[in-house]
Image (cartoon, rainbow, N blue to C red):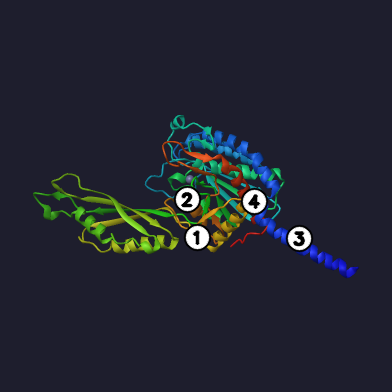
């Protein structure tokens, strides 16, 4: 009796374990899926509200209104909310005098894992464009100003949290939400905070949108820098006394030519001089000349290396009396594919498979950079981008939209990944 009971237990265990293993690949978590379906209509309503507020990175009144709305929503979900002034501002050429504030919310659970969820409330659109791109639904598309980039990100975060709250889920140790207001101008006032919070959490999920063409997550984004070169010479009459001048244009030309071979296709490093300006009038030896280069890198280390190389090169001058200044503006570091973010995304792929959907995991950076890279700068933890809805038309003058059919899968994915990670089923680093 005893033996057969043990044997029976052994059999049920074997059978049960087999079911559990196959269930992971095949069966969706019904409670989460039902919650995601239930949340779809509410998410669309939220999107309509978020799109009704114009939040260009320089539109402080709109950003203020948005930050208050989001703070209210996060508080209602049970978060401890702060609205933070920009701090440790990294000033670039186009950084406005005043920046919008960042909304931060902390949700405390009963587990141990700490997750950071990020999305941005600012858009590239100056005030006045809303009238031409009002919110509207046509077939599977929800249109709106800034809806894909990145109002959907705010909405997906809010409604994933609403799902978890509705189910009484508290398996996480802490979820921190960060909504910044300066992403589209390279995050001058929020980058330091993003990097610090990234390092304080066990995983970062970033909610930029996924493409309409492909349903994916991104492990890598491009690093972008701007180089400006300024040459100071000395003015003199070009006809009367050219010999007393120092020709800044000659020196600039020399500098550009000796720094034209710094691209390295093997590592995806691109450095191209794209703009130049010199002189005041035709009959004066030019006292000043400037040039700018666009830089793209795929690895953080290359970002450091290319700046060093530029600084070395400018030491070699054509005119010893000319003064050459170089400014290396770090617009945004690259996000690199790592074993940690790959493992996180591979797990997400399995979760997506439960819905019968294939999730692509992109390990190669495309054009743009995102805030995920700032969050990843000082951590070995997984940082994964594009947890948002599928959509298209970002940064264009018409027809930005998200796919309504991506709402349920993406809500399910986000909420399920929060739970999976919290319960230790995803490798942390
Ligand atoms: Zn964006």
Residue 407, above or below 301:
above
Alpha-carbon neighbours of circle 1 within 10 Å: few (<14), some, or many (≥20)?
Answer: many
List the single residue furthest toward the bottom: 3
Q: In the picture, which quadrant includes the N terminus? A: bottom right
**Distance between the alpha carbons at the discs numbered 1 and 4:** 22 Å
Q: Is mark 2 within 8 Å of ligand 1?
A: yes
**Distance between the alpha carbons at the discs numbered 2 and 4:** 24 Å
Q: What residue sits right under mark 3 in the picture?
A: 16
Alpha-carbon neighbours of circle 3 within 10 Å: few (<14), some, or many (≥20)?
Answer: few
Q: Is mark 1 within 8 Å of ligand 1?
A: no
Q: Earlier in the sequence, mark 4 or mark 3?
A: 3
Residue 289, above or below 266:
above
Q: Tell which tag, 3 or 1, sits nearer the viewer.
A: 3
Q: Are marks 2 and 4 in contact (CB under 8 Å)?
A: no
Q: Earlier in the sequence, mark 1 or mark 2?
A: 1
Q: What residue sits right under mark 1 in the picture?
A: 337
Q: What residue sits right under mark 2 in the picture?
A: 370
Q: Position of residue 335 (x, y in %)?
A: 48, 56
Alpha-carbon neighbours of circle 2 within 10 Å: few (<14), some, or many (≥20)?
Answer: many
């Amino acid at each position: 009796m005893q033996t057969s009971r043990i044997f029976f237990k052994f059999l049920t265990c074997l059978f049960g374990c087999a079911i559990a293993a196959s269930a992971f690949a095949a069966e969706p978590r019904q409670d989460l899926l039902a919650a995601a379906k239930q949340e779809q209509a509410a998410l669309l309503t939220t999107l309509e509200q978020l799109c009704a507020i114009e939040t260009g990175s320089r539109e402080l009144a709109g950003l203020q209104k948005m930050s208050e709305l989001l703070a209210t929503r996060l508080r209602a979900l049970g978060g401890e909310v702060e609205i933070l002034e920009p701090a440790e501002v990294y000033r670039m050429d186009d950084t406005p005098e005043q920046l919008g504030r960042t909304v931060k919310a902390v949700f405390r659970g009963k587990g141990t894992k700490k997750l950071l969820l990020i999305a941005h409330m600012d858009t590239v659109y100056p005030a006045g464009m809303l009238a031409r791109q009002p919110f509207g639904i046509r077939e599977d598309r929800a249109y709106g100003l800034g809806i894909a980039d990145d109002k959907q990100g705010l909405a997906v975060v809010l409604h994933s949290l609403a799902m978890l709250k509705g189910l009484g889920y508290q398996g996480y140790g802490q979820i921190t939400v960060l909504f910044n207001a300066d992403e589209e101008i390279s995050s001058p006032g929020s980058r330091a905070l993003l990097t610090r919070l990234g390092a304080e959490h066990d995983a970062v999920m970033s909610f930029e949108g996924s493409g309409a063409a492909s349903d994916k997550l991104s492990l890598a984004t491009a690093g972008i820098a701007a180089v400006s070169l300024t040459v100071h010479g000395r003015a003199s009459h070009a006809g009367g006394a050219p010999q007393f001048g120092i020709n800044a244009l000659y020196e600039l030309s020399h500098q550009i030519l000796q720094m034209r071979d710094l691209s390295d296709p093997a590592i995806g490093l691109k450095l191209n001089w794209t703009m130049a300006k010199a002189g005041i009038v035709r009959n004066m030896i030019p006292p000043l000349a400037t040039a700018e280069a666009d830089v793209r890198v795929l690895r953080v280390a290359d970002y450091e290396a290319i700046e060093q190389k530029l600084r070395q090169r400018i030491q070699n001058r054509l005119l010893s009396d000319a003064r050459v200044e170089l400014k290396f503006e770090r617009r945004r570091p690259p996000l690199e594919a790592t074993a940690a973010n790959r493992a996180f995304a591979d797990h997400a792929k399995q979760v997506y498979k439960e819905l019968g959907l294939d999730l692509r995991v992109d390990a190669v950076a495309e054009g743009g950079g995102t805030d995920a890279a700032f969050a990843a700068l000082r951590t070995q933890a997984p940082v994964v981008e594009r947890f948002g809805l599928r959509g298209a038309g970002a940064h264009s003058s018409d027809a930005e939209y998200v796919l309504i059919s991506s709402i349920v899968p993406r809500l399910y994915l986000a909420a399920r990944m929060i739970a999976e990670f919290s319960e230790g089923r995803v490798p942390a680093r």
